[in-house]
Image (cartoon, rainbow, N blue to C red):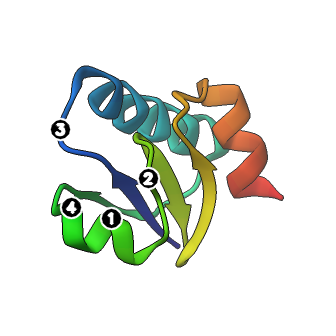
């Protein structure tokens, strides 16, 4: 599983990254987590708001800091 956090490195982006790590631990899953800060790469996903969560190339959420429980549902579903 590949998870990308799209955003310029703001506080919300950092929080989403931390929540993804917590969700993976709670779900007992491994994943490659990458922070994407390049605006050009972010817009290639069609994303205009950050932070955004991308799982295996699919944009799952835009402009939200999901809780670890919400992320766990996404990565387990």
* Residue under the point 40% across and 41% down: 50
Q: Is residue 58 left or right of residue 50?
A: right
Helix, strand or loop at label 4? It is helix
* Residue under the point 52% across and 62% down: 54
Q: Which residue is mark 3?
A: 9
Q: Which residue is mark 2?
A: 48
Q: Which residue is mark 4?
A: 39
* Residue under the point 66% across and 44% down: 27
Q: Residues within 10 Å of mark 1 (few under 14, many from 20)?
A: many
Q: CA distance from mark 4 to mark 1?
A: 5 Å
Q: Nearer the viewer, mark 1 or mark 2?
A: 2
Q: CA distance from mark 1 to mark 3?
A: 12 Å
Q: CA distance from mark 3 to mark 4?
A: 11 Å
Pointers 4 and 1 in contact (CB under 8 A)?
yes
Q: CA distance from mark 2 to mark 4?
A: 9 Å
- Residue 14, above or below 77: above
């Amino acid at each position: 599983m590949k998870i990308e956090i799209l955003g310029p490195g703001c506080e919300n982006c950092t929080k989403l990254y931390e929540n993804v790590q917590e969700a993976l631990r709670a779900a007992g899953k491994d994943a490659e987590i990458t922070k994407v800060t390049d605006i050009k790469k972010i817009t290639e996903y069609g994303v205009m708001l950050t932070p955004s969560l991308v799982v295996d190339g699919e944009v799952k959420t835009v402009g939200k800091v999901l809780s670890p429980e919400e992320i766990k549902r996404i990565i387990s579903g």
